[in-house]
Amino acid sequence: MKIGEVSKWHPFVDSEGTVWDLSFLDAHEAIFTHKCEGKKDRDYKFIVSYSSHCFCKDYPEQTELEKQRLMYPSPRESRPFCKRRYLLAQRYLKNIILTLDKQRIIHAGYGSYAVLEVLDEESRSIYYHVPFKVFRENKKFRLHITSAYPVMEKPGGKKVGFYVIAYNLAHNKPLPHP
């Protein structure tokens, strides 16, 4: 799959030799079927990719040595591997993306949209900020996850429907903005 982002992530091997598989973030297709009463169903097919920000983060309390030991090199930048972001992404991210048409999506600023809330393993609601961009690339619909991280409080932002975004993209209309 030829796209302008990483399509296959190589695993991260930490300083103790533990291998952290990242294949769950490899680029993939996602098809969303918009069912409208009295109208023909419409399929929207996106090629989905993920940035390293879904599993990398440097923290101010980390020493330079710690950051270097955790460094994950990617084509655009190198950032320290983050176990917390990794585990959240592994558990929730792909399912969130495959169900975007059922998620509460908000405007996230800078031409991005975001999903906010997921249920954890104990059915508690947690805030997981997942900003993404949609665009066309080589005549295909693209969805790029620019980051994914936990937040303590529910971020604000005007709600927007996924199918409004997809419809506008398909019909070369301006994407919704707040």
Image: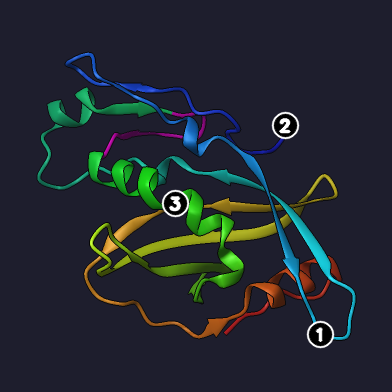
State which tag comes first along the sequence, 1 or 3.
1
Q: Is residue 58 left or right of residue 73?
A: left
Task: Quote the CA–CA distance across marks 3 and 2.
Answer: 20 Å
Q: Position of residue 97 (x, y in %)?
A: 54, 56
Which one is nearer the viewer's eye here, 75 or 14? 14
In terms of secondary structure, where does tag 2 sit? loop
The secondary structure that dominates the magenta segment is: loop
Q: Earlier in the sequence, mark 3 or mark 2?
A: 2
Tags 1 and 3 touching, CB below 8 Å: no
Left or right? Give the position of 146 relative to 121: right
Q: Residue at x 76, y 75 (%)?
A: 174
| Earlier sequence position, callout 1 versus callout 2 | 2
Residue extent of the magenta highlight: 74-82
Residue 1 numbered tag? 2
Q: Which residue is mark 3?
A: 93
Residue positioned 64% across, 40% down in the render: 28
Of residues 137 and 10, the one drawn nearer to the viewer in this rendering: 10
* Residue 64 highlighted magenta (yes or no): no
| Type of amino acid under label 3 | Leu
Q: In x, y percent, where is residue 81?
A: 29, 34
**Element under disc 3:** helix
Q: Is residue 124 above or below residue 178?
A: above
Where is mark 1, residue-wise?
A: 37
Measured as percent of width and height from the top left, residue 5 is found at 61, 38
Quarter residue 162 falls in: bottom right
The label nearer to you, 3 versus 2, is 3
The crowd level at tag 3 (other Cα within 10 Å; few <14, some 14-19, many 20+) is many
Q: Position of residue 95 (x, y in %)?
A: 49, 54
Left or right: residue 161 compared with residue 121? right
- Give the answer, above or below, for where 16 lies relative to 126: above
User: Label 2: how many residues lie within 10 Å, few (<14), some (14-19) or many (20+)?
Assistant: few
